[in-house]
Image (cartoon, grey):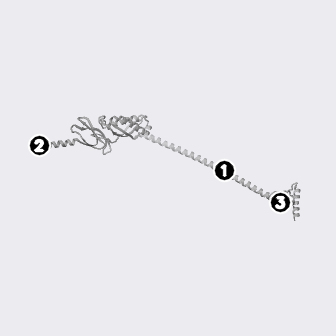
Amino acid sequence: MMFTFLVLLIVLALVFVAKGVIIVQQAEVVVIERLGKFHRVLESGFNLILPVIDAPRAIDWKVTARDFGGTTYSTIQKRTRIDLREAVYDFPRQNVITKDNVSISINALLYFQIVDPKSAVYEIQNLPEAIEKLTQTNLRNLVGQLDLDESLVSRDKINSELRAILDDATNKWGVKVNRVELQDIIPPNDIQTAMEKQMKAERDRRAAILEAEGLKKSAVLKAEGEKEAAINRAEGEKQSNILKAEGVAQARILEADGEKQAIQRIIDALANKGQPDKYLIAMKYLDTMKAITSGKDNKVVYMPYEATGILSSVDGIKQMFDSKK
């Protein structure tokens, strides 16, 4: 009898230890109720409770899973441990009507974190499902205020506004909404076809504009090049003419200087022996007559009225040289 009692006590002690010791993992908590009333929150590590009197509070948690065929389905699980890490919730795709009455399909991701386990247990019955319904409702309201084109290009705006709304609404549930991301925004097939045609037309228009601008720039550059080439040619011709004129002028100056020196030598040679001026006139006259009669078709020979004076000058030159001899 005594042995049986001892065995019973040992069994009761083991059961007490098994039920009274709770080891909580890191980043998890357990809500403990005493006689059905909130008692405390067990942190990570080794914890002791009173069996029968204390008991963990179980909560409903919606879980999404896929079967072997790839079909997604949701189930409700009972959990006594609350995960404090950031959770990712992938919402099922839903149809939303835009401001211009176009039905589009949207898929969203929500990143949230439980910061107050007590509120998450006692302020809402099923936290994931409540967040899902709240997100879907507010997403319809936000997209319903935008046109289709605005919805397609305003993802960041929708994400930020939806996150602010959800964070404010879930605050009393002890939840912090960190991010909201819209994965896909898919319009109907006929709208997609029309958009593709519009995009193709827009691309063709831009290509035509770029081609026209390229031709315009090419023509402008070609005209500028021809203008600069013409200016350079004119400048070159100008410099060439200036150099030619300078060359001719210098040649004439040199020729005049040479002639001047020749005349000066003649004058020096004939000084006190004759009349240099008559000699020079006679020589110029003879050169002129030679030029007149040297042509191929020049057959007329004439003597000017004053030729006798020139001849007398020539005769005087002859006499001058004879006297010198």
What is the three-letter code of the residue carrying label 2? Met
Image mark for residue 252: none
Counting from the top left corner in percent of width and height, residue 48 is at 24, 41
- Residue identified by numbered label 1: 235
**CB-based contact (under 8 Å), mark 1 and mark 3:** no
Counting from the top left corner in percent of width and height, residue 161 is at 40, 36
Most extreme residue toward the left is 1
Circle 1 — which element? helix
What is the three-letter code of the residue carrying label 1? Glu
- First of labels 2, 3 by sequence position: 2
Return the residue nearer the eye: 280 or 226. Answer: 280
Q: Residues within 10 Å of mark 1 (few under 14, many from 20)?
A: few
Q: How crowded is mark 2: few (under 14 residues within 10 Å), some or many (20 or more)?
A: few
What residue do we see at 18% from left, 42% from top? 13
Image mark for residue 268: 3
What residue do we see at 49% from left, 42% from top? 202
Measure the alpha-carbon separation of dots 1 and 2: 132 Å
Measure the alpha-carbon separation of dots 2 and 3: 174 Å
Most extreme residue toward the bottom is 325
Measure the alpha-carbon separation of dots 1 and 3: 48 Å
Which quarter of the rendering shows the N terminus? top left
- Residue identified by numbered label 2: 2
What is the three-letter code of the residue carrying label 3? Asp
Counting from the top left corner in percent of width and height, residue 92 is at 35, 40
What residue do we see at 70% from left, 52% from top? 242
